[in-house]
Amino acid sequence: MDRISAIRNVEDALRRFEDGKASLAETERRTIAVLRTYATEFEGPEAVYRAHGSDPIDGTVVVATSEAAARERILELVRSDPSENGDVPGRNAELVDGTTEHIEGDDGTEDGDRIRFDVEKL
């Protein structure tokens, strides 16, 4: 599914909701289904990757050109979103390949938590 088709399908779902032909739950299911279909059939040189491991990284999905780029993007997302890391000041993300990267918190402190994760190409 290309981007335009995905947008049209989401618009259709919203229109049905606005017209009273679909409930909020039904609209959410349809919208999520469109997004998942779009993500798994992503067209272009990039691919979709999902992280597996400890919270807050587990389940994070990103678009990247390689597995290494996906790992970097996932770490960037966790660093930039305090709600994703539970406002923990700092974390060390230990990659499955044995390398470790520190995720520093907003106040510059460290707490030594370790997050092990791997990425799967969807």
Image (cartoon, helix red, strand yellow):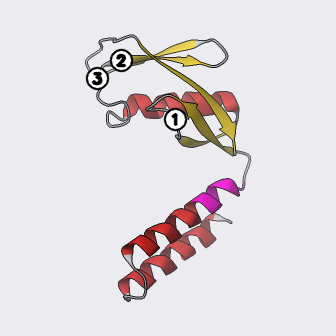
Residue 14 location, quadrant: bottom left
Which residue is denoted by mark 2 in the rendering? 90
Neighbour class for label 1 at 10 Å: few (<14), some, many (≥20)? some
In what quadrant of the picture does the N terminus appear? bottom right
Q: Nearer the viewer, residue 119 or 42?
A: 119
Q: Is residue 52 left or right of residue 66?
A: left
Q: Which mark is residue 106?
A: 3
Q: Which residues are magenta?
A: 36-43
Q: Main secondary structure of the magenta part?
A: helix
Viewer-nearest of discs 3 and 2: 2
Residue 115 - label: none
Mark 3–mark 2 Cα distance, whole angstroms, equals 8 Å
Tell which circle, 2 or 1, labels the residue nearer the N-terminal end.
1
Q: Earlier in the sequence, mark 1 or mark 3?
A: 1
Which amino acid, by three-letter code, is at mark 1? Asp
Q: Residue lying furthest left in this view?
A: 107
Which numbered circle lies on residue 58? Answer: 1
- Residue 56: x and y in percent read 43, 32
Identify whether 83 is placed above or below 88. Answer: below
**Label pair 3/2, CB-CB below 8 angstroms:** no
Picture coordinates of residue 71, whole percent (x, y): 59, 29
